[in-house]
Amino acid sequence: MGSFPERVLQAADLYHEGKASRLLIVYESMGPFQVLESRGADIIRTTEQARDAAIDLGVPANSITMLPGEARSTLDEAVVIREYIKDKPDIDTLLLVSSPAHMRRSYMIFRQILRNSEKPVYVGTSPSSYSSFNPDKWWKRKEDVQSVVSEMVKILSFLTIERREYRE
């Protein structure tokens, strides 16, 4: 769910352009927020905010599927999506929406998790055009440099550690 406003805007645009017929949103892990809820605090999950924003942007509620999963990462989301589409023969294409800096790693993760699926699934990408990240001049802004360095570390972690767990 990362920077969800830019991602929801992109997903809603894709829906209205006819490039996506439905949105799949995996519930994120709430961690310590669940303690707040247990003590009576009213917490609105990021995933619920994303769903509500998409509806406000004109995506019909029945075109949004909320998937349980308590996801802490893109890897967790990919595993939840894999299990969901296993029984959905009509789903043969996924269009990932993410921030531009995160897109490469998202694609790598989803391709790895879906590569041994019972049916082939095409994974496409749609980096959000609403992001302030500039992939052509990322070295000119401190925030963009931090995003690139962070993604490099996360890609290295995925390639050397996390991917091994999912070589099914």
Image (spheres, helix red, strand yellow):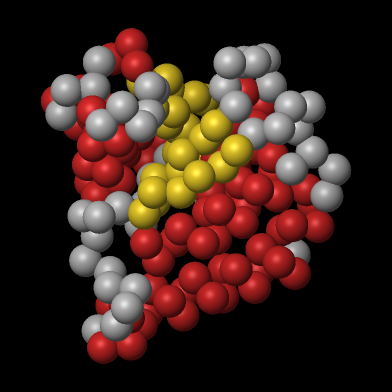
Horizontal arrangement in the rendering, residue 139 relative to residue 106 (left or right): left
> In percent of the image, x 23 and y 46: which residue is there?
5
> In percent of the image, x 55 and y 32: which residue is there?
93
Q: Position of residue 94 (x, y in %)?
A: 52, 35
Q: Which of 83 and 35 is in front in this view?
A: 83
> In percent of the image, x 36 and y 54: which residue is there?
127
Q: Where is residue 13 in the image (x, y as percent from the top left)?
A: 23, 37
Horizontal arrangement in the rendering, residue 103 relative to residue 127 (left or right): right
Q: Nearer the viewer, residue 134 or 122?
A: 122
Q: Can residue 35 be seen in this view?
A: no
Horizontal arrangement in the rendering, residue 162 relative to residue 105 (left or right): right
The residue most toward the right is 168
In the image, residue 147 sits, relative to residue 9, either above or below, namely below
Q: Where is residue 26 in the image (x, y as percent from the top left)?
A: 47, 32
The image shows a total of numbered marks equal to 0
Residue 162 falls in image quadrant: bottom right
